Image (tube, rainbow, N blue to C red):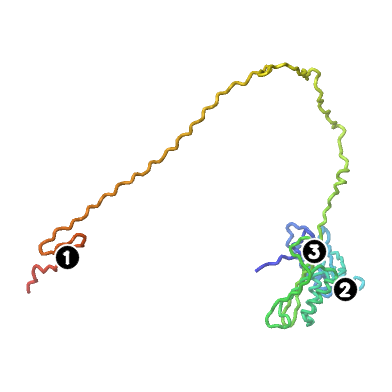
Amino acid sequence: MGHKTHPVGFRLGVIRPWQSVWYAGKGYRDLVQDDVKVRGLVRGKYGEGDVARVEIERNANQVTVTIHTAKPGVVIGRGGQRVDELRNLLEKETGRRMRLNIQEIRQPELDAYLVARNIADQLERRVAYRRAMKQAVQRTLQSGARGIRIRCAGRLGGSEMARRETERQGRVPLHTLRADVDFGRAEATTTLGRIGVKVWIYRGDVLPERAERPAAEKAKAPVAVSVGEAAAPAPSLALPVGAVSTPEPAREVAVAPGETAGVPPPAATAPKPARARPARPRSPRPKTEAKAETPTETPAAAGPGEAPVAAGEAKPRAPRRRPSRPKAAAEAAPA
């Protein structure tokens, strides 16, 4: 069976930040348990407030909890009463000093978890699953998404056998790291069982930010040189006066035809003898042996009482006698 990579975890450190920002040595296990407990308390207390995600950042003195929600008024409450209640609850459960930040989500149609939670709520209210999926696709694309994919699995429509249904529109590149793909899932608890909802939303490409200094600024940057470091003088390339001799002018000399002007003729070199090539030995031919003549068998003389056998005829074979069984030398005497 194939396993699908989580789109959010696949892009951590590239275009997605971590939802828990802290460092721990030996107490790593305790901090992870605290994070799980904090997220469970927040979602349990504000389940109707459409809480998309909870980010936790730990410092030396306090813990900062950022709640991303589509309904900040429900989370804050009248005069901040519900925020104070949540802060006291978290400090009591974890034993640490808490600071809460409420962040509003401007477009909940582009958040995968909120879309999945909306479809699950409609399925619990007995809305047809195809209608809920198509409406979610239309609203997401109208909000500016590049693509969306929704999958519902379970006893859809009250069927006896569970199955999966998928609604897809646009493109959702799962293996492109620069693609901003959000993923969320939710469960709908119905009288016939649970129905799982998964949502993938492609919101466009996001290039990772890199702090690069322009090349022009690098070229204009001054170079610091210490006062004590003086540049060494370059070595002189001038030569002394008498080091270079003046070439003499060329003179014309009359030369008779057939002679050379003071240049001895090249010595005549004897031609090299041609190197004889060794003869290739020939392998002797195998001698054919003369075939020995096979003497013709002469028919043997016929014995007495036998008919003569002509040459070339086979001698009739005598019948073979069966040896007689020897008799007992003596019979046993009667007692």
Q: Are marks 2 and 3 in contact (CB under 8 Å)?
A: no
As rendered, which of 244 and 134 lies closer to the eye? 244
**Residue 202 placement (x, y as % from top left):** 79, 67
For the C terminus, the quadrant is bottom left
Query: Which mark identifies residue 74?
Result: 2
Q: Which of the two marks, 3 or 1, is nearer to us in this view? A: 1
Q: What is the spatial separation of the Cα atoms under label 2 and label 1, in whole angstroms?
A: 130 Å
Q: What is the spatial separation of the Cα atoms under label 2 and label 3, in whole angstroms?
A: 29 Å
Name the residue that disc number 1 marks: 318
Q: Check disc 3 and give the amino acid type.
A: Asp
For the N terminus, the quadrant is bottom right
Name the residue that disc number 3 marks: 180
* SS type, badge 2: helix
**Residue 131 placement (x, y as % from top left):** 79, 79
Residue at left offset 10%, top offset 69%: 328
Q: Check disc 1 and give the amino acid type.
A: Ala
Q: Quadrant of residue 55?
A: bottom right
Name the side, left or right, on which 302 lies relative to 4. left
